[in-house]
Image (tube, rainbow, N blue to C red):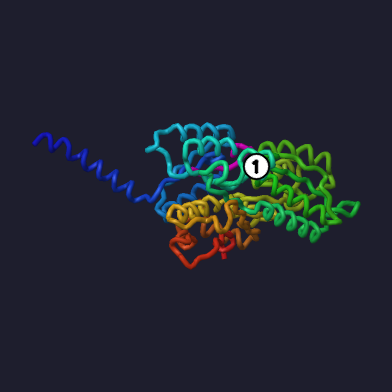
Amino acid sequence: MRTMKFFRPMLVLILACVQASAAWSFSVTFINPGKSDEVYWLTVTRAMEAAAKGLGIKLDVIYVERQTLRAIDQATQIAARPAAARPDYVIIANEGGTGPEMLRILDGAGIKTFMAFSGIIQPAERAVTGAPREKYKNWLGSLEPQAEEAGQLTMQELLRIGRARKLQAPDGKLHVLAISGDRATTTSVKRSEAMRKVVAAAPDAVIDQEVFGEFRRDKAAEQSEWLFKRFPNAKLVWAANDLMAFGAMQSLEASGGVPGKDAIFSGINTSREAMEAIRSGRMDALAGGHFILGAWALVMLYDFHNGRDFAGEGLEMSQPMFALFSPDKARLFLDRYGEGRFDSVDFRKFSKVVNPALKRYNFSFEQLIR
């Protein structure tokens, strides 16, 4: 009798664990390259959590705090786990060129891997990895935002506003300061390339200097302090993310300037601070929405796991995901999704398994704010 009393609570606990695990269809670990207190990467996680909840996926997120080599360490630790403790899938980002090594490690352990946000574009990386499902059989594929879109939209809007406000220098040209991200991450490279193409195609615009702020607010503030002094005719500031735009604004304000008046700024991302800056006029051009990509990656893995391979649309997909935000769109975004509230999005309706008539994925962010 005493034995039964002893084992009953344990039996209840075991049954509860079995029932909880049965609620998940499969497990995914995301090696998040950002910081655990960084708005963009936190928003990525919140959207993924909402998608995972709707799709019945067990999601684990590991932040590497923007220390790129830690991503490789995390991949190594996951590969070293006993088979029963490994996730069914791992999502990685090729930040700082760490993707090829993570693919090698995870594929060697037989773990199915999906690359998101930043894929393989550099020839040296491609020589190592090949294409998905070739050299590394467990590398299922990749999904990237059309990063060029962000650079193009923001630079075009910046030039349009500069012309409307007659911010040309005495030489008749719009002078631009460009604060790019880094030289290694795929999305960063593509954003900056698109920005340069827009300026090159505009006969009335010129880039005075481009610097690399590594997506950091503090570094952009330091760089822009001397940029504004060196190039007093530069009234347009293009930044590859919102944090660097705010760093540049900080430098302008420290010297007595007013953002939106003495210089106009662009940024990328959907932080509350960026949305409020668009609404107040401190920032004039903002593109964002690509944070939702992690959630779309889970939709693709859900379909793959349930027998609908995405290979028919391509193993390395690049989709438009950026929206250009006006003050009204910024207000609507904050009302619907402020503070990372994405439970209102029915991610199941984007699944080909749930909706067999769906032939192609539509991963644009614009549809979520209409």
In the drawing, does residue 81 fall left or right of residue 281?
Answer: left
Tell me the residue at 46%/65% (across/down): 356
User: What quarter of the picture does the C terminus occupy?
Assistant: bottom right
Q: Which residues are magenta?
A: 90-99
Residue 92 inside the magenta-drawn segment: yes
Q: In percent of the image, x 66 and y 54: which residue is there?
A: 286
Residue at x 57% of width, y 46% of height? 132
Q: Position of residue 309 (x, y in %)?
A: 50, 55
* Image-based side of 112 in relation to 67, left or right: left
> Which amino acid type is shown beneath numbered disc 1?
Arg
Residue at the spot of label 1? 126
Name the residue nearer the viewer: 305 or 298.
305
Image coords of residue 306 (percent x, y): 42, 55
Q: How many marks?
A: 1
* Residue 208 pos. (x, y %): 83, 45
Q: Badge 1 local density, few (<14 within 10 Å), some, or many (20+)?
A: few
Is residue 216 among what the camera can see? no
State the SS at label 1: helix
Q: Residue at 55% across / 49% down in the picture?
A: 141
